Amino acid sequence: MSENCNNDCSSCGENCAERDPKSFLEKPKESTHVKKIIGVVSGKGGVGKSMVTALSAVMAQRNGYSTAILDADITGPSIPKMFGIQERAGGNEEGIYPVLSKLETKIMSINLLLENITDPVVWRGPVIASTVTQFWKDVFWEDVDFMFVDMPPGTGDVPLTVFQSLPVDGIIIVTSPQELVSMIVEKAVKMANMMNIPVIGIVENMSYALCPDCGKKIKVFGDSHVDQIANQFGLEILGQLPIDPKLSQASDAGTIELFEGNWLDPLAKKLTELIEK
């Protein structure tokens, strides 16, 4: 560090240790051993990022891996609802215990700590970012094969905190079939590159709807651009999710772990490859 350092790395060209993202990593509990941490991101809200997070954990669990979800979407948490979790998280002076889903996925979310799940979280950015860090270092995660981090949309405080504070192994970008998506995906890819985080691949949600009478694919949001986007940024397509009322019903009923469908099989295969490296 220079003697004249003002702690503003954005205006500095020095190559010092303080610029290394690894220097910001937070240490979890000594009992915590997570093999792979996967961030699930999107450039904008409403594309089904939490759905993909939940399905990723469910599929990894079905393939015999122990899974966990760190819900980093502090102001818009939905993971506990999808898994039908209504109890509050417990803890002691040393830390917090995650809540187990019916099939034993470990989950930590702000909704598991609130008196009422409908209470809004009206916090400023630094407080939200600090909470996410606490979910990593103050929770007794124990042994986990895959931890999926459900990020809030965009490239703000929380994604930056997660990328700097957690040893993230890669991210999955969730998108939808719209023209402006290319620009949004590019932002996510550029942020990942800036933080030296690998992009595992891209998942397109709401790709189509199936006609219940004839089985024809109806492109509700227009033609898909996922192939062009994947080629443009050198990304692997990990799945295309349809608009399926059964998925929505399962999420609302808290039975997402019972879903049936093979849309994300490429993602499941990719996860197996990652952990077997």
Image (cartoon, rainbow, N blue to C red):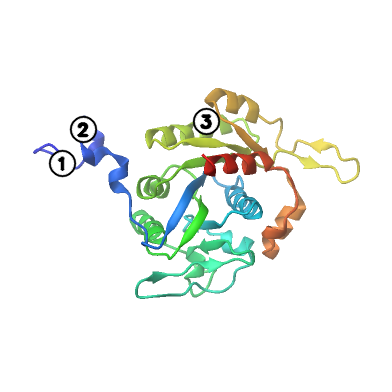
Question: How far across and how far down the image is residue 49, in percent?
Answer: 58, 47
**Residue 12 badge:** 2
Mark 1 burial class by Cα count in 10 Å: few <14, some 14-19, many 20+: few
Q: Can residue 44 be seen in this view?
A: no
- The quarter of the picture where the N terminus appears is top left
Q: Examine the rendered structure and indicate whether residue 102 appears above or below residue 34.
A: below
Q: Is mark 1 on a helix, strand or loop?
A: loop
Distance from disc 2 to disc 3, alpha carbons, whole Å, reads 28 Å
Marks 3 and 2: in contact by CB < 8 Å?
Answer: no
Pointer 1 residue: 6
Circle 2: residue type: Cys
Which residue lies under the disc numbered 3? 183
Report crowding for label 3: few under 14, some 14 to 19, many 20 or more residues within 10 A (C-alpha). few
Callout 1–callout 2 Cβ contact below 8 Å: yes
Relative horizontal placement of residue 255, taking residue 164 as reference (left or right): right
Position of 173 with respect to 140 (left or right) is right
Q: How crowded is mark 2: few (under 14 residues within 10 Å), some or many (20 or more)?
A: few
Q: Which of marks 1 and 2 is nearer the N terminus?
A: 1
Give the quadrant of residue 14.
Answer: top left
What whole-number distance in Å separates the C-alpha atoms at marks 1 and 2?
A: 9 Å
Quarter where residue 216 is shown: top right
Lower position in the chain sequence, tag 1 or tag 3: 1
The structure residue drawn at horizontal position 46% and vertical position 58%, both measured from the top left corner, is 74
Q: Closest to the observer: 242 or 144?
A: 144
User: Visible in this render: residue 237?
Assistant: yes
As drawn, 262 above or below 258? above
- Mark 2 and mark 3 lie on one chain; the one further toward the N terminus is 2
Q: Residue at x 72, y 53 (%)?
A: 247
Q: Are marks 1 and 3 in contact (CB under 8 Å)?
A: no
Kindly identify the amino acid type of the residue bearing the numbered disc 1: Asn
